[in-house]
């Protein structure tokens, strides 16, 4: 029996690659597509499926899983709409806070559906997170640098935010000079995300890159992930999550938890 999937953000960078990949998989079915400005047009690579203007409209067709690659301003509302309809969700859109995820987890548990969210669905980004969590068990000081295109509307990236919040589950990093004791522009020390200092660069020529920098006496460790210009690395991880999400209840955060348990 195939899994019916609706893609929200179907005409976006990742969505355009996801739609034909779903249609080509023997165990998946493109049940719907959402893109407000393209409503009524064929889904990318799947002309028999028409794009809807809203998630609510798209879910009128039988759907098992909603994949959301839309915008930080609407992803939470889209997810709640799907949860209330009894549809599982895979969130690929960044920009949600830890509080947002907590609220979505509660809503999903009430409806007994699953949600899987990741700041980055590429396997190598999941490895970055996995290695950073391991390093934090042994090195007490770290910071994160987040690189993205100058047009990216949210900061930090979902990759950086997820890493900082997951690192806080290990411990909080040591700080040499407390921020309140710094001289000059305190903002230059970056944002405090769950106790980790995170620095976001937004410049042309970057797609997505993220560095976790660990420092100890007379040595440093730098773990870096860089994304290329193709959405292909995100497709496999997203579809893995879509296949697994109906096996969970509540919200699971991080592709690494699917890969490594």
Image (tube, rainbow, N blue to C red):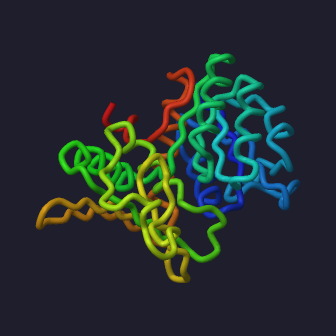
> Which quarter of the rendering shows the N terminus?
top right
Q: Residue at (45%, 41%) from the top-left corner? A: 254
Residue 239 image point, x, y percent: 51, 43
Q: Residue at (26%, 47%) from the top-left corner? A: 136
Residue 76 image point, x, y percent: 71, 41
Residue sticking out furthest to the left: 218
Q: Residue at (70%, 46%) from the top-left corner? A: 75
Between 89 and 225, which is closer to the camera in this rendering?
225
The answer to whether 253 appears left or right of 55 in the picture is left
190 versus 30 height, above or below: below
Q: Is residue 198 visible?
A: yes
The answer to whether 124 appears left or right of 147 in the picture is left
Residue 242 image point, x, y percent: 54, 37
Q: Is residue 48 visible?
A: no
Residue 153 image point, x, y percent: 66, 66
The answer to whether 217 appears left or right of 258 in the picture is left
Between 35 and 94, which is closer to the camera in this rendering?
94
The answer to whether 87 appears left or right of 219 in the picture is right
Residue sticking out furthest to the bottom: 204
166 versus 105 height, above or below: below
Q: Residue at (60%, 45%) from the top-left corner? A: 97
């Amino acid at each position: 029996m195939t899994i019916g999937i609706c893609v929200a953000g179907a005409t976006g960078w990742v969505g355009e690659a996801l739609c034909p990949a779903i249609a080509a998989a023997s165990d998946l079915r493109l049940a719907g597509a959402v893109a407000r400005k393209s409503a009524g047009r064929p889904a990318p690579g799947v002309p028999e499926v028409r794009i809807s203007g809203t998630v609510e409209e798209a879910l009128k067709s039988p759907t098992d899983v909603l994949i959301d690659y839309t915008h930080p301003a609407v992803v939470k509302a889209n997810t709640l709409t799907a949860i209330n309809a009894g549809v599982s969700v895979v969130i690929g859109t960044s920009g949600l806070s830890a509080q947002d995820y907590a609220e979505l987890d509660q809503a999903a548990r009430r409806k007994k559906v699953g949600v899987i969210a990741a700041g980055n669905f590429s396997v190598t980004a999941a490895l970055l997170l996995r290695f950073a969590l391991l390093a934090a068990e042994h090195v007490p000081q770290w910071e994160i640098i987040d690189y993205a295109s100058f047009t990216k509307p949210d900061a930090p990236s979902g990759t950086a935010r997820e890493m900082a919040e997951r690192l806080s589950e290990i411990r909080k990093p040591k700080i040499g000079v407390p921020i309140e004791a710094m001289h000059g522009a305190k903002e230059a020390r970056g944002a405090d995300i769950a106790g980790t200092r995170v620095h976001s660069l937004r410049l042309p020529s970057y797609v997505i890159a993220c560095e976790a920098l660990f420092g100890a006496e007379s040595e440093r460790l730098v773990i870096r992930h860089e994304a290329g210009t193709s959405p292909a690395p995100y497709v496999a991880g997203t579809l893995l999550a879509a296949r697994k999400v109906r096996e969970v209840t509540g919200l699971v955060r991080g592709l690494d938890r699917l890969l490594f348990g």
